[in-house]
Amino acid sequence: MAAEMNAAVVQSTYVAYPSYNFESSSIELARSQWPNYDDQYYLRGCKWSPDGTCLLTVVRGAGMHVMELPTDLYSGDTLLTSRPIQPLVPAVSVPESGLIYDYCWYPGMNSGNPATCCWLSSGHEGPIHLWDAFSGELRCSYRGFNNVDQLEAAISVTFSADGQNIFCGYKKNVKIFSTARPGRDYVEYSTNHPASCIIVSQAQPGVVAIGTWKNTIELVSQSDGTFRHLCKLSGHKGGITTLAFSMDGTRLYSGARKDKEVICWDLRVPGRPLFCLSRESNTNQKITIDVSQCGNWLVSGGTDGKVQVWNVQESTSPTTHIQLPLHNDCCNGVSLHPYRPILATSSGQHHAQDPLHHTRTAQNYENALCMWWVGKQQEDPDLITAIIKAATNS
């Protein structure tokens, strides 16, 4: 990641909230593509950094990659429809060969302060790693052990809202590490089922949601480095794979594997779902959701390659605002830029192989990381003039 990218300078040119324009067709800004080899290098989600300067993605079998936001997208309220698609080249790559279960940015990440530029990852049969976002080097590791003192891989990871602690989901508990103390010192909070995903409320930093493979969500309160049970939410048909808090912390959105419903929970009255939204999710693959900074828009990928967009503030039972057919393969990851009207998506999935002909059954493969403009658009006047002149001369 380029050292000259100072997030403080970048953010000074941003508006408070991005001005979205989902009614217009989205414009593809940049793309990175991985080949369709037998190894199947499909992507596993994407996440914007908290300062918005770069995008992190994981590719099955090809490690983790950091892509920088193109410099011409740092400012401006309107985009010319004639802008060419820019190829994305990784600024930093970490060639992790094993399966990556989960990853997350440090919440205080600021490109103007290299010490804060890092991310966590957890992988198959390994410890939790903290990676440097400038060099791609390993900073430190956090090791969790089971009841027979064997190293155990974390299924999910996230930072506390202030970044002082790391919450890691395991098969029988959540382990709480101090970020400043790498190693094997941690506090455990027992869970009845494997903790498949964990998120922290930014509006209410003491509230943590723990999703499990047993279709339930547990809300806990964080205090003094420990957890205290608040309530349990049940309603999904499959194991929880994605969670998102609303910006004011009063709502929780959840999605599950092989479950077409995205459920909204009103945490002020958590007994039953507030409303349910529909998307395509017919595999065990994690299909992520995201909420805009203004709190109005919820987006979700789908196994049909479409991105669903809802205005979740328009009513108590919102309908799909628009469907964006952005990919030919499964759209497994969506991430809204924190300061610009830019949507990042990732695509790809495992395609079964025909055992007789040794070929893949699917016809469409698209293992891509893309950036899309979902703000105001403007026709290029020079291009219109050129088209009129060409038509006149003909």
Image: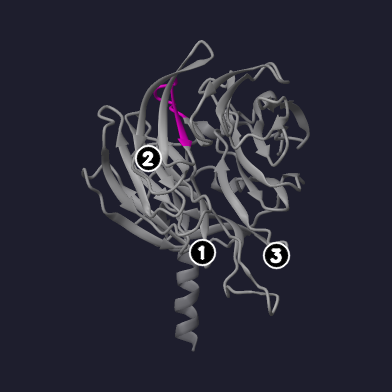
Instruction: Determine the residue located farthest toward the front in the rendered image.
Output: 148
Foreground tag (3 vs 2): 2
Q: Residue 127: horizontal and vertical position, in percent?
A: 71, 32
Disc 2 or 1, which lies upstream in sequence?
A: 2
Dot 3 surroundings within 10 Å: few (below 14), some, or many (20 or more)? few
Q: Residue 169: horizontal and vertical position, in percent?
A: 56, 31
Q: In this figure, which residue is indicated by the disc labeled 1?
A: 327
- Taking the image as shown, residue 191 lies to the left or right of residue 229, namely right
Whether residue 128 is visible: no
Q: Is residue 254 magenta?
A: no
Q: Residue 182: horizontal and vertical position, in percent?
A: 71, 20
Dot 2 surroundings within 10 Å: few (below 14), some, or many (20 or more)? many
- Mark sitting on residue 155: none
Which quadrant holds residue 5? top right
Q: Residue 96: horizontal and vertical position, in percent?
A: 75, 45
Q: Residue at x 61, y 67 (%)?
A: 352
Q: In this figure, which residue is indicated by the disc labeled 3?
A: 35
Q: Amino acid at mark 1?
A: His
